[in-house]
Every structure is written in C-alpha cells, then in structure tokens.
Amino acid sequence: MHSKILMKIIVIILLVLIGQLQYRLWFGDGSITEINTYQTRLNDLKLQVEEKKHRNEMLYAEVLDLRKGQEAVEERARDELGMIKEGETFIQVIE
C-alpha cells in the first residue's frame, strides 16, 4: 500500500519537474521563441552592417576619386548638374 502511494508521489513530482522544464524551454528566459527572435534580429543587423560597409566602401572610393583631381569634379558636375565645358557639345539621348 505504501509503495503505491510512494510511486504516485514520485510520478507527480517527476511530472511537475518535467512541466517546469518544459515551461522554461518554451516560455522562460532563453526559450526557443526568444532565441529565434534574437537570431532573426541578429541576421537583420548583420545585413544592415553589410549594407553600411558597402556604402562606406563606395563613399571611400568617391573620396579617393575626388582627391585625384579635377577630372572627378568635372565628371560629377556633368553627371549631377548637367554642366558642360566651353567648347564641348552637349548631346542628349532620349530613350
């Protein structure tokens, strides 16, 4: 009789422990949902870092071009402002 009661108590204790562990696994600190959320955020941040690195590389290359001299300034003036030098002929191609 005592062994049956003892077994029921042990089973109940084990079920409570398993339930507590399952709760922590799914809903507590460091849960699977939280880890997945952090992993998604980390992936987004890595993508943003790569985009910023690419942008910085392009800006650095532009700075180097501008340091090279007048040619880069003239090219930028033509592309962005539509300026032309004296003696040049402007031809606009409409697509």
Image: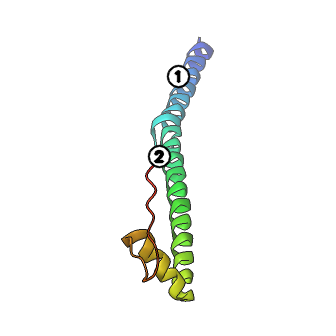
**Tag 2, which secondary structure?**
loop
Q: Are marks 1 and 2 in contact (CB under 8 Å)?
A: no
> For the residue labelled by badge 1, is the local secondary structure a helix, a strand or a loop?
helix
Residue 24, placed above or below residue 95: above
Q: Is residue 38 above or below residue 2?
A: below
Q: Residue at x 51, y 46 (%)?
A: 40
- In this rendering, position of residue 4 left or right of residue 19: right
Q: In the displayed structure, would residue 60 be above or below residue 9?
A: below
* Quarter of the rendering containing residue 15: top right
Give the residue type that dot 2 points to.
Asp
Position in image of residue 84 (x %, y %): 42, 77
Q: Which residue is mark 2?
A: 29
In this view, the residue in front, 32 or 47, is: 47
The residue type indicated by label 1 comes to Ile
Q: Is residue 61 above or below residue 3?
A: below
What residue is shown with label 1? 12
Q: Is residue 4 visible?
A: yes
Counting from the top left corner in percent of width and height, residue 2 is at 59, 16
The front one of 23 and 13 is: 23
User: How many C-alpha atoms fall within 10 Å of the one at disc 1: few (<14), some, or many (≥20)?
Assistant: few
Query: In terms of depth relative to the viewer, which is nearer, 19 or 32?
Result: 32
Residue 5 appears in which quarter of the rendering? Answer: top right
Q: Residue at x 53, y 45 (%)?
A: 35
